[in-house]
Amino acid sequence: MLKTQFMQKAILLFSLFFIVLGSCACNKNQTSDVEPEPEKTTYANPVVKYSLPDPTLLRAEDGFFYLYATEDIRNVPIHRSKDLVKWEFAGTAFNDNTRPNFEPNGGIWAPDINFIDNKYVMFYSMSVWGGEWTCGIGVATSNNPAGPFTDKGKLFRSNEIDVQNSIDPFYIEQDGQKFLFWGSFRGIYAIELNSDALSIKENAQKTRIAGTAYEGVYILPRNGYYYMFASIGSCCEGINSTYTTVVGRSDNLFGPYLNKAGASMTDNHHEVLIRGNQRFVGTGHNSEIITDDNGNDWILYHAVDKNNPKGRVLMLDRIHWSDGWPFVINSSPSITEQGKPFFNH
């Protein structure tokens, strides 16, 4: 009797063991049969649906692109991405205690990020609307692209350098010299910086580079030319914004920058790169141009989305080249799915 009960329990335990073993094997086979979802190879504008105006970016040593924008998100928002398409919020450059304050109640606009002498160096504008003689440009540094940044103070104000509306900085180096370009609808100017790029070189004189139609300048050296990208029109009137991205080129950093017909940006002549369309308007203040691992060039900029016109959303489009000139398909933002940038991470 006891022997029979023992045998029955043993058989039951062995049966349960094989049932569990079979279930595990089945689950294992089911798991291995599930293919990971392939990474999407296309994107559609906008790549960020909330307001990130006046973008500037660089690729840091950790492989991420870090993007900085005018502070519609207070204290200068920082975002990061591996592919220029999927962006995540990474923090802010400043906080309420560390933010620049040389313009009381001023906003921090149009930053320009650079990696100089093993530091992340961000030039920025500080202004209030209408404060064209009190606004100015400052500089801040960090050891980390995600911040925090330490403000090094102002470089100059409009009334100190005698250039009205001194905002929208852009930094560039040439032959070991360091220069700052800036300006907004009162002329585009350039001046030499000291070797640390944190102050104006003693006795440096400003040089006027372009006319009164422009702001938000970015200069790209390419194949023996300098390409000056800039914005014209109104940035900030919602769906009535007329902002347009334009370009001219020169064989000299300091110009003259010309259009295809040979007319000068000093006299407000240029080529249109990106204008509004039925979906997006106010297309301007572009970032640095980024070349992906397939050799394709990409530009980020902001626009107003007529489908959701609150703020200025982040846009991405490919730059093509023909006869030494950049262009965007249809000279306007893409409104359908496009092939995305390729980066071999």
Image (spheres, helix red, strand yellow):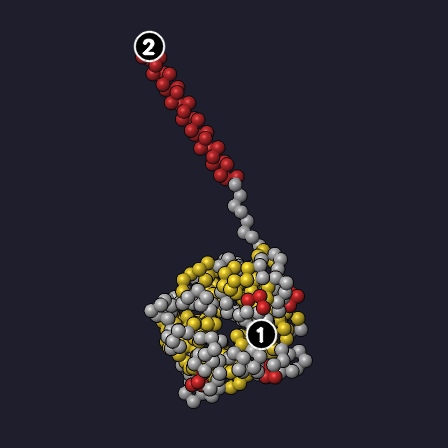
Look at the picture and state if 213 lies above or below 17: below
Seen from the viewer's position, the closer of residues 182 and 1 is: 182
Question: Dot 1, crowdedness within 10 Å: few (<14), some or many (≥20)?
Answer: some
Seen from the viewer's position, the closer of residues 99 and 325 is: 99
Q: Secondary structure at mark 2?
A: loop
Seen from the viewer's position, the closer of residues 298 and 162 is: 162
Residue kind at label 1, given as amino acid type: Gly
In-image side of 294 versus 6 (left or right)? right
Q: Secondary structure at mark 1?
A: loop
Q: Which residue is mark 1?
A: 233
* Quadrant into which the N terminus falls: top left
Query: Residue at the spot x=55%, y=59% of the render?
Result: 308
Residue 291 in view, yes or no? no
Look at the picture and state if 146 lies above or below 132: above
The extreme left residue here reads: 2
Q: Residue 65 location, x and y as percent? A: 48, 63
Location of residue 249 (image quadrant): bottom right
Seen from the viewer's position, the closer of residues 10 and 231 is: 231
Look at the picture and state if 209 lies above or below 68: below
Q: Which residue is mark 2?
A: 1
In-image side of 320 versus 205 (left or right)? right
Q: Residue 112 location, x and y as percent? A: 47, 72
